[in-house]
Image (cartoon, rainbow, N blue to C red):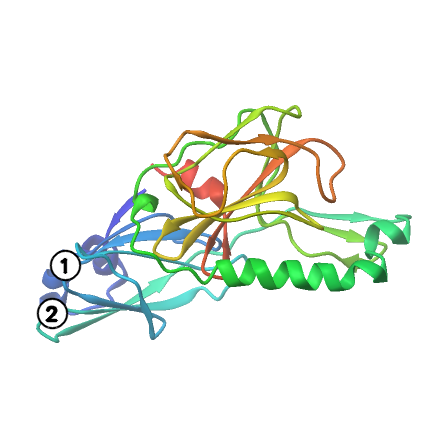
Amino acid sequence: MKVWLKALLLSANLLATQQLAAAAEITLDGKLTQGSLIRGQAPAGAKVLFNGQPVKVSATGQFVFGIGRDADLQHQLTIIAADGSQQQLPLTFTSREYDVQRITGVAQKYVTPPAEVTERIQNDNRKVRAVRTTLSDKTAIFAEPVLPATGRISGVYGSQRVFNGEPRNPHYGLDIAAPVGAPVLAPWSGEVLLAEDLYYSGLTLIIDHGMGVTSTLMHLDAISVKVGQQLRQGEKIAEVGATGRVTGPHLDWRINWLQERLDPQLLLSAE
């Protein structure tokens, strides 16, 4: 869904008429809702701030930002033109409802991992956080994505389980059920940042698509690429598996903007 900010801001009565004329040069592509990645276009040479923080901008004025599952709904985009003039663009996002399942009688070993793996989990988390700080000049993320596997959608972003009254972390990916060995494709072009066996996610790939956006592909049975390798959109990079903490074979595909966890399905359904 492509939103022309001029129309958006007119309907919300957010800016004066003379400011709107300049805002017509700015477009946003995406759904203004929780968990969404928004792709934008500003005039070349402009600087962009989201909630007061600088956002990476390409040489041609492309930029991205996003908000998480439970983020506040009021945000602000600031565009600073090459001549120093500024536009303050308030944005109102919509809230979402998520599927929450309450399950009782679950054995404790499935709720809390054993103490002996705590250090490994912490080390895994540090590695993942580190690669998700990558801010490259790649602009692959502005293409439409390729679904990385073929199969039934078995899990969605934002869902959450409550085991024995104890809330677990929400699910932040799109699960695609497929048999072990089914091909996994690169959703966009990019560079491999991580290819490792992690405690929770099993064999895991993290790919940089540029501008702070990464894909994470989890529970793989085999990985056919290595760290530093440049990937083409749609090429086979791995195979579906059931590694890590899972109950059956599937691909868990996740998208991040830096440390912000976003919903891949919103990009697939964009119009």
The residue carrying mark 1 is 43
Foreground residue, 125 or 72? 125
User: Quadrant location of the C terminus?
Assistant: top left
State the residue position of label 2.
Answer: 82
- Which element is circle 1 on? loop
The amino acid sitting under disc 1 is Pro
Q: Residue at x 38, y 53 (%)?
A: 32
Q: Classify residue 16 by image quadrant.
A: bottom left
Marks 2 & 1, CB-CB < 8 Å contact? yes
Image vertical order of residue 135 relative to residue 30, above or below: below
What quarter of the picture does the N terminus occupy? top left
Residue 70 visible in the snapshot: no
Residue drawn at x 42%, y 29% is 235
Could you tell me residue 259's position as x and y percent?
50, 62
What residue do we see at 79% from left, 58% from top? 117
How many tags in the picture? 2
Where is residue 15? Give x, y as percent. Answer: 20, 68
Residue 34 location in percent, x, y?
48, 55
Q: From the viewer's perspective, is 98 left or right of 148?
A: right
Q: Is residue 90 above or below residue 241?
A: below
| Nearer the observer, 41 or 114 | 114
The amino acid type found where label 2 is placed reads Ala
User: Which of 183 and 261 lies nearest the eye of the viewer?
Assistant: 183
| Residue 21 visible in this rendered orientation of the protein | yes
Give the class, few, some or many, for how many residues have Cα within 10 Å of label 1's Cα (few <14, many ≥20): some
Left or right side of 89 for 166: right
* Residue 120, position as x, y percentages in the image: 73, 59
- Where, by quadrant of the figure, is residue 245 drawn? top right
